[in-house]
Amino acid sequence: MSYDDSPEAMQRAGHIWFPADHNRIRWWVGEGRCTLVRPGLPAEAARNLGLDFDPFWTCVGRLEHGQGARLFAEWVVGRPDMGIAVTASKVEVALDAYYQRLEDWAPEGWDSTLSERMGGDTAEAMRLQFSSRSPTFAVLSDTEHQPVVDDMPSELTEVAETCENVLPMKRSVYYRS
């Protein structure tokens, strides 16, 4: 799973990071589709930490109905290339749980977590950008501010089967007698 988030590549593709909220994701991302989100951090935040790639963007996908019903989840959020993914029945919960796990992530060669390297307060502020009260994150959009929505990559669909479900919710079924 990859996305070239360099300013040059984004300009060529006509992409920008546009401020968003959870409803924007729910409206635009249909079953079997996904979009990318990123906290409102400077583009050079990863380089300042000594990383040669941006670990802050992630893929948010809505599971197909059959898979979601079987897993008791509707959303999968993750970066299989980094080994982080969660499922949940609510997008807000899935994003919060994903970024909690990102805080505890340590790239190969590091002797500390991302949170320790960033500073605990900065890492917490990054996660709180996905709070349902006052979201301040961005969604990958085209230059007309429409979210870029694509088919969910197979690696994200596959990881949904084995990753942690942070908010399982069984759907009740009502049969009229």
Image: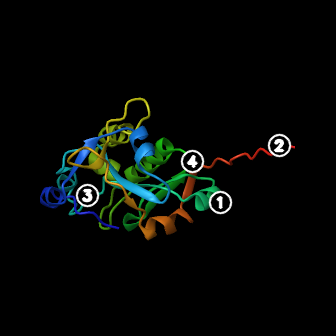
Residue 176 - label: 2
Pointer 1 local density, CA inside 10 Å: few below 14, some 14–19, many at least 20:
few
Verify CB contact (< 8 Å) between mark 2 and mark 4: no
SS category of the residue bearing label 4: loop
Residue at 77% over, 44% down: 174
Residue 89 - label: 4
Determine whether 101 is above or below 119 in the image. below
Image spot of residue 70 (x, y percent): 65, 60
> Callout 1, which amino acid?
Arg
Q: How is the image coloured?
A: rainbow
Mark toward the start of the polypeptide (2 vs 4)? 4
Distance, label 4 to label 1, CA atoms, is 12 Å
> Callout 4, which amino acid?
Ser
Image spot of residue 74 (x, y percent): 55, 52
The residue identified by callout 3 is 54
Determine whether 158 is above or below 129 in the image. below
Mark toward the start of the polypeptide (3 vs 1)? 3
The residue identified by callout 1 is 70
SS category of the residue bearing label 3: loop
Residue 29 - label: none
Front disc: 2 or 4: 2
Distance, label 2 to label 1, CA atoms, is 23 Å
